[in-house]
Image (tube, rainbow, N blue to C red):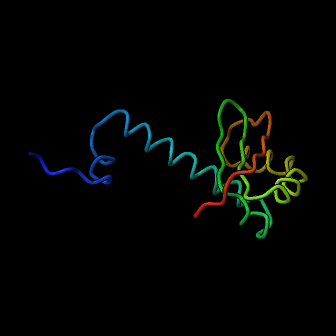
Amino acid sequence: MQKPKSVSELLSGPGKRLNALKMHSLERSRVLDQVRAALPIRLAQAVASAGLEGGRLTIGVVGAVWATRLRYFTDALRRGVSGSSGIDILSVRIRVVPPVA
């Protein structure tokens, strides 16, 4: 019986599915960094996730109050993330998500 591979071994291997998953995860992480950089520090700390797909920027925040505050920054976010990513952002979607543990 073969010894099970670690997750890092699987991600560094040649598999297409895991490689695509790794690239998607890296892209979402990059977008999250861009979103946080475009926001005031306190608001940036409330952003738990971000993704960009088909011209739509989707942002997950940890509470409804933060979602409301973030809506005031949608134009600035659209310009900032669009400028740093080189992708035209057509819409911004804000979702309340459970806090990251």
Q: What residue is rendered at 78% in x and 58% in y?
A: 63
Residue 53: image quadrant is: top right
User: Along the line of sight, which residue is nearer the eye, 77 or 98?
Assistant: 98
Q: What residue is rendered at 71% in x and 58% in y?
A: 47
Q: Quadrant of the C terminus?
A: bottom right
Vertical side of 89 occupied by 36: above or below: below
Residue 85 position, x and y percent, is 66, 45
Asked whether, in this view, residue 43 is left or right of residue 15, the answer is: right
The residue most toward the top is 54
Residue 96 position, x and y percent, is 75, 50
Q: Quadrant of the N terminus?
A: top left
The residue most toward the left is 1
Q: What residue is rendered at 58% in x and 52% in y?
A: 30
Asked whether, in this view, residue 9 is left or right of residue 47, the answer is: left
Vertical side of 17 occupied by 8: above or below: below
Q: What residue is rendered at 30% in x and 48% in y?
A: 12
Residue 82: image quadrant is: top right
Q: How many marks?
A: 0
Residue 25 position, x and y percent, is 50, 46
Residue 39: image quadrant is: bottom right
Asked whether, in this view, residue 75 is left or right of residue 38, the answer is: right
The residue most toward the right is 72
